[in-house]
Amino acid sequence: MMYKEKLMQLYVNDEPVLSEHNTLSALLESYVSTEQRVAVAVNQQVVPRSLWSDCLLKDNDRIDIFESIAGG
């Protein structure tokens, strides 16, 4: 019997998406190149890059991807 991944409804930058990725790092592979400097928030909580692979996603999570800008 084949195991079928459950698709989750997520919102990436306010756009609804269906995803089978259960970690933030797996999802971001579709959106961000490894060279890009970005900040990411899940449900309005910033997630440090070092924790992306540990951040588990669930239905209706809202992921915001921001370009990092030098300066301040």
Image: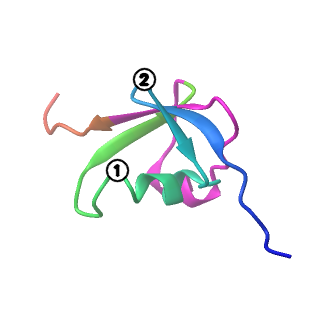
Residue 57 percent location from the top left of the image: 65, 44
Q: Is residue 5 left or right of residue 18?
A: right
Residue at (27% x, 60% y) in the render: 33
Looking at this view, is 68 or 16 the one in front?
16
View extreme (left): residue = 71
Question: Which amino acid type corresponds to the residue marked 2 in the rendered image?
Answer: Asp
59 is within the stretch colored magenta? yes
Looking at this view, is 72 or 34 the one in front?
34
Q: What secondary structure is marked by label 1? A: loop
The residue wearing badge 2 is: 14
Indicate the quadrant where residue 53 lies. bottom right
Q: Residues within 10 Å of mark 1 (few under 14, many from 20)?
A: few
Residue 7, compared with residue 17, is above or below; it is below
Q: What secondary structure is marked by label 2? A: loop
Residue 38 percent location from the top left of the image: 30, 45
Sooner in the amino-acid sequence: mark 2 or mark 1 = 2
Residue at (36% x, 40% y) in the render: 39
- Tell me where the magenta segment starts and ends, as one range: 44-65
Q: Quadrant of the C terminus?
A: top left
Number of marks: 2
Residue 34 percent location from the top left of the image: 29, 64
Question: Which amino acid type corresponds to the residue marked 1 in the rendered image?
Answer: Tyr
The residue wearing badge 1 is: 31
Residue 40, compared with residue 13, is above or below; it is below
Residue at (48% x, 47% y) in the render: 48
Give the CA separation, mark 2 to mark 1.
14 Å
Residue 33, compared with residue 6, is above or below; it is below
Q: Is residue 51 left or right of residue 58?
A: left
Residue 5, compared with residue 63, is above or below; it is below
Residue 54 percent location from the top left of the image: 64, 57
Q: Is residue 26 left or right of residue 3?
A: left
Residue at (61% x, 35% y) in the render: 9
